[in-house]
Amino acid sequence: MKDLLRTEHLSRADVELLLSTAAEFAENPLRSNTALANKSVAIYMTKPSTRTRLSSETAVAHLGGTPIFIRGDELQLGRGETIADTAKIISGYCSALIIRTFAQADVDELGAHASIPVINALTDDDHPTQLLADWLTIREKFGSDITGRKFVYLGDGNNMSHAWLLMGAIMGAHVVAATPSGKWAPDPVVVAVAKNIAAHNGGRVEVTHDPESAAKDASVLYTDVWMSMGDSEADRAEKMPALSPFAVTENLMKLTSKDSVFMHCLPAHRGEEVEASVIDGPRSVVWREAYHRRTTIQAILYHLIKGDLKGSTH
Ligand code: CP
Ligand code: NVA
């Protein structure tokens, strides 16, 4: 496996390897601090980022390399140079390319034409690096035996909901997405892919439109912003009321298991998708989750450069 373009490309064994290496980076951030010595990693983003940008830059630095951050408007790509040509040029200078953009197809195309690892740092459809941080956080809380546990995402059927279902399926977990029906439900194609992966890994993938039944006895309630980067502002007036029953409130948390946690990829909008008392309360693990963005990106870079990820066969 040369790249990390989509969550579904990871096998269970790949995720296990990445999580165990990331846990070592959490213990000792400077372990392997020459893995990228004399090497550079390009980080190209056409959307804003706090966590992914900073964790990627610090991950490269901790591995002994030089991060080169490039804003969306700074490449000739914006003036008509092709993705294929850009991929070849960056491959000549850098050892990896981390990209955040709109279309998943653009990331796939970069991966196809670059000779170096290409890492998806969020598209409109997926957010694989986030899910590794999420699962390391879940591991730290619940250990690796997740039998009988339910992992629930509530809110918009967006990129995060897709990545949540796909990674849960890879991990053999019981994962749920509770979203409105119709326009803001997860893409049915992604749900079908997740169900297929789950069938091979002993997982269970559920999509529901009932937030209370989803929250009942859940080990994790996870949410994300209701307006994603790139969403049309014209949808806001219709979208906010449609999503409001899926907000993570104190009342919803009361339905969950005794040892449940609250998770959020961040940025958060308190008073919209989550109540302030939940995200800032004792069950919230959002800061540890955000911390693991660096440890997991370090692990992804380390293993992609080493070339020992196998990829999924499903
Ligand atoms: N969670 C996440 O990807 O955050 P940023 O948009 O700040 O990178
Ligand atoms: N769904 C959000 C995730 C941000 C990390 C977005 O795409 O803006």
Image: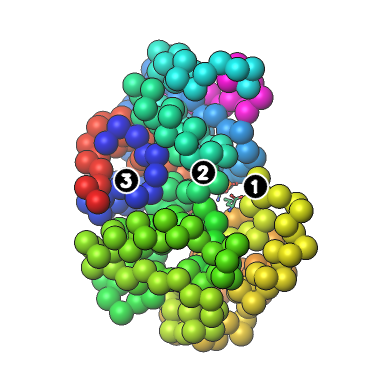
Rendered residue at 37%/39% (across/down): 4
CB contact under 8 Å: marks 3 and 2: no
In the rendered structure, the answer to whether residue 272 lies left or right of residue 202 reads right
Q: Nearer the viewer, residue 155 or 70?
A: 155
Q: Which residue is disc 1 drawn over? A: 229
Q: Which residue is disc 2 drawn over? A: 122
The segment highlighted magenta reads 63-77
Type of the residue with mark 1:
Met
Which of the marked residues, 1 or 2, is nearer the chain's N terminus?
2
Which of the marked residues, 3 or 1, is nearer the chain's N terminus?
3
| Residue 64, magenta (yes or no) | yes
Q: Nearer the viewer, residue 32 or 49?
A: 49
Label 2, ligand 1: CB separation under 8 Å: yes
In the rendered structure, the answer to whether residue 162 lies left or right of residue 149 reads right
Which of the marked residues, 3 or 2, is nearer the chain's N terminus?
3
Label 1, ligand 2: CB separation under 8 Å: yes
Task: Tell me the quadrant of the picture where the N terminus can be found.
Answer: top left
Whether residue 246 is visible here, answered yes or no, is yes
Type of the residue with mark 2:
Leu
Rendered residue at 73%/65% (across/down): 238
Marker count (numbered): 3
